Image (cartoon, rainbow, N blue to C red):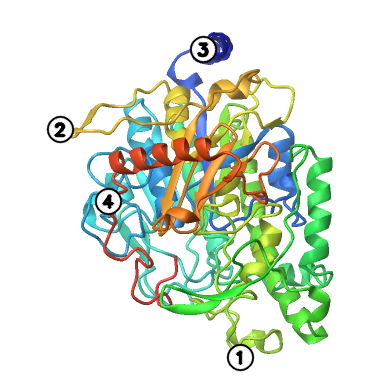
Amino acid sequence: MAATRYMATFAERFLAFVLLTSVLCGEGVAARPNIVILFADDLGYSDIGCFGGEIETPNLDSLAQKGLRLTQFYNTGRCCPSRASLLTGLYPHQAGVGLMVYRSYPGAGYRGRLNDECVTFGDVAKSAGYRTYMVGKWHAGHTPEALPEVRGFDQFTGVYLHIDSYWKVLKGCDVYRDGELLIEAQENPTNPYHPEQEFYTTDFFTDAAIDYLQQAAERPAEPFLLHVCFNAPHFPLEAPDELIEKYRGRYLKGWNQLREEKFQRMKRMGLLRSGQKLPRGRRHEEVAVEGLVFKDLLDRESLPAWDELSPSEQEELDFRRALYAAQVDRMDQGIGRIVEQLRRQDALDNTVIMFFSDNGCSGELDLFGMNWPEHTRSTYSQWRKAGGWSISQGQCWAHLSNTPLRKYKQFVHEGGIASPFVVHWPAGIERTDDIADEQIFHLIDVMPTICDLAGAEYPKMHNGREIKPAPGISMAPYWTQRASEPETRTLLWQHLNHSAVRRGDWKLVTLDDRDPGSWELYDLSTDRSETENLIGEHPQIASKLRTAWRTWAEHSNVVPFPETRGSSRPNPFPVPQ
């Protein structure tokens, strides 16, 4: 009976979406919506204002107010795997990027680039008559057969690998435009769109996106898809001085008080289900990760008490968080400029804008971040453009960013994989509420959503090769009507030694899938913070979920595992993710 009721409600939602699409497409291909996908890098679940954050993000907040927020949207927990999953609609191992892209391991899931058994949403949109543009950080493979220009994008401006500076272009981070070298590695690059301004990646990528929008306006008969991948707010912490000063002093309350304030604010905003708790700290231990030894917030989250730090230490940590906040603020300003350009082109109403992040906030590296003695606030003018692994905010501030969730980037507890999601589409969103919390979604759902929006068909074959079926669902029907009975889905994760499976509100997760006794079970309907391990009370549920994870791992290129899973690179310092 429950299945019958679900099918009825889903059919109603789908019919509503079909009717809406038919109206939009009634005047021909040009009436289909344009699509803009905005992708942040290492942004925390609750960093932005419309998700309870203390950082000023008025442009994203405005999009959310006039659009919809999805509170249960997931990524894969790490940069390259998330990009592969987003682009292809597959789990990352299915696309060949189960780890990072710097090395190819034996096994189909760890090729270090997009494989030949997948297509990108650029490919799919192009097949439906869309003009496809991409800007920013690619990081899904840097061999010739894996570059964006041959993976579905008509035009691309950005960096094929990582980006390890905001002010400079460092070795290995050369900037390309439409297949040609635009800016080679140098200390003082020039922004070709605004030579009079100081080069800053967030501004440069925004300028490139606006340039592509202007080009799209010259082809009014073609709808367009624009994918913008910011490197903000990934470390190194680098931002314009005036924005840093804007946030200085705001964090002297410390992470304990600020987390509590944010938690209460999120409850008032309706972002948290009843019964959710803010995790309390227990302990930290020294653990070895990627050949380094540092303090990891192990069992729960052992945040040191802020008032136990000296005033000088508090000032240093306030400065680091101000740098991070300034990076998020500048990204929001760039998003505002993109939205304004769409408005000037009279394209905003029928453009679907989606915003989300590749993983949770980064806890790299140590409790308080990278700690180089020469990198302090008093000497900041000497190293403000150092780049690389020069400065980060660490695990304590990461937990503020991910409030009220546990863990952070690289892990598959909620703090590592939960992302804020904002969608804005005046011509298409019909829901009267502005928060959708009834259905869980994942990066794999962006591909079928784009197929729906573009009227495209996901292919079975591409360039003479069989393409893996896409496991996701379209989000579009949920934008038009709230689901009374959401679909009970099974979503799965695996990265490094961390694994998880979620079915409905039950989640099984482990910090080390090599240890059969390390799995934890949580009921996310009341405990999304993962504080009450229920595996002892519900062993049968845990057993079924673990069987589902094992079956998925065996059929999705997760196994065989590479010989070394603890690191995809021998030395983490030269090549940040």
Q: Amino acid at mark 1?
A: Pro
CA distance separating discs 2 and 4: 17 Å
Query: Which numbered disc, 3 or 1, marks the residue that appears first in the sequence?
Result: 3
Disc 3 residue crowd, few under 14, some 14–19, many 20+, Cα 10 Å = some
Query: Which numbered disc, 4 or 3, marks the residue that appears first in the sequence?
Result: 3
Q: Left of 230 or right of it: where is 426?
A: right
Q: Amino acid at mark 3?
A: Val
Residue occupying the point 56% across, 52% down? 413
For discs 4 and 1, the disc positioned in front in the rendered view: 1
Residue 146: give its label: 4
Q: Amino acid at mark 4?
A: Ala
Q: Helix, strand, or loop for circle 3?
A: helix
Q: Read off the residue under disc 3.
A: 18
Give the vertical position of 481 relative to 435 (above or below).
above
Q: Helix, strand, or loop for circle 4?
A: helix
- The N terminus - image quarter: top right
CA distance separating discs 3 and 1: 60 Å
Q: Position of residue 134 (x, y in %)?
A: 42, 47
CA distance separating discs 4 and 1: 40 Å
Q: Position of residue 521 (x, y in %)?
A: 57, 45
Q: Helix, strand, or loop for circle 1?
A: loop
For discs 2 and 1, the disc positioned in front in the rendered view: 1
Query: Which numbered disc, 2 or 4, marks the residue that appears first in the sequence?
Result: 4
Q: Read off the residue under disc 2.
A: 464
Q: Position of residue 69 (x, y in %)?
A: 67, 36
